[in-house]
């Protein structure tokens, strides 16, 4: 059974990554914030009494479902109101994304980074994020869960509602596409 403090600590630990993941899917900062907040409330309300080790997978599934619900609502609104504008891409430059920073050459604690290096690293991170955002939805979802959320194949499959082989295939294709796109831009690990 998770205590209130453990639940609070868990939610605090996933909020930035959950926001970034939602932002990649919906490409709207306000909607992404709403989705994450709704997911957190649902987890606390319906699953707050679950053991702490079950919370990550439950939260990922809730987040996926809330994102799908958002898309369904948007589809309904578009059908009813044909003058709704298309979704515009958005980026949050302040959100942490450790995997990408490592890929972009994040400085270690001993080094002093020059302004030029900071700008170059920020540009590389932006290009990597753009490439992740351009992945097909299921590939992006599998990639983010496996390599960003560090979930194993079984957890990812359960959260996505698909087979383990599908997760492996989505991740393989995502890594291939990202590698090819980043290599074409001269970005290597």
Image (cartoon, rainbow, N blue to C red):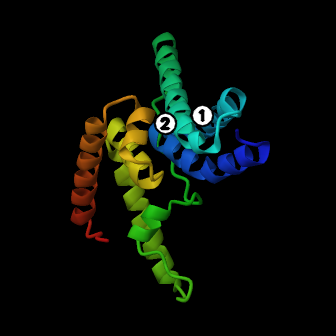
* Apparent side of residue 2 relative to residue 55 in the rendered image (left or right): right
Q: Quadrant of residue 19?
A: top right
Q: Position of residue 113 (x, y in %)?
A: 52, 85
Vertical side of 99 occupied by 2: above or below: above
Q: Residue at x 38, y 59 (%)?
A: 128
Q: Is residue 87 left or right of residue 157?
A: right
Residue 82 appears in the picture as rendered: no
Q: Which residue is mark 2?
A: 26
Q: Does 17 sit left or right of 123 as displayed?
A: right
Q: Secondary structure at mark 2?
A: helix
**Residue visible at 56% across and 83% down?**
109
At a point 72% along the width and 48% down the height, the residue shown is 6
Counting from the top left corner in percent of width and height, residue 90 is at 51, 46
Tell me the crowding category of disc 1: few under 14, some 14 to 19, or many 20 or more residues within 10 angstroms, Cα based. many
From the viewer's side, name the closer residue of 5 and 41.
Answer: 5
Residue for badge 1: 35
Q: Earlier in the sequence, mark 2 or mark 1?
A: 2
Q: Position of residue 47 (x, y in %)?
A: 66, 30
Looking at the image, residue 95 lies above or below residue 188: above
Mark 2: few, some, or many residues within 10 Å (few <14, many ≥20)? many
Disc 1, SS = helix
Position of residue 154 measured from the top left corner of the image (x, y, whole percent) = 38, 40
Q: Quadrant of the C terminus?
A: bottom left
Q: Could you tell me which quadrant the N terminus lies in?
A: top right
Residue reaching furthest top?
80
Task: Determine the residue positioned at 45% across, 54% down.
Answer: 148
Which is more toward the observer, 11 or 22?
11
Q: Are marks 2 and 1 in contact (CB under 8 Å)?
A: yes
Residue 24 shows in this picture: yes
């Amino acid at each position: 059974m998770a205590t209130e403090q453990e639940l609070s600590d868990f939610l605090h630990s996933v909020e930035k990554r959950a926001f970034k993941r939602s932002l990649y899917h919906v490409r709207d900062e306000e909607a992404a914030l709403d989705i994450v907040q709704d997911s957190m409330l649902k987890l606390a309300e319906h699953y707050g009494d679950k053991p702490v080790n079950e919370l990550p997978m439950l939260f990922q599934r809730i987040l996926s479902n809330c994102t799908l619900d958002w898309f369904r609502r948007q589809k309904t609104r578009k059908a009813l109101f044909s003058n709704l504008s298309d979704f515009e891409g958005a980026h949050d430059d302040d959100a942490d994304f450790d995997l990408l920073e490592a890929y972009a050459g994040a400085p270690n604690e001993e080094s002093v980074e020059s302004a030029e290096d900071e700008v170059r690293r920020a540009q590389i991170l932006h290009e990597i994020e753009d490439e992740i955002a351009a992945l097909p939805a299921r590939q992006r979802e599998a990639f983010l869960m496996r390599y960003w959320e560090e979930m194993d194949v079984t957890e990812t499959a359960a959260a996505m509602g698909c087979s383990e082989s599908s997760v492996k295939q989505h991740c393989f294709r995502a890594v291939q596409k990202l590698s090819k796109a980043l290599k074409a831009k001269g970005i290597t690990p």
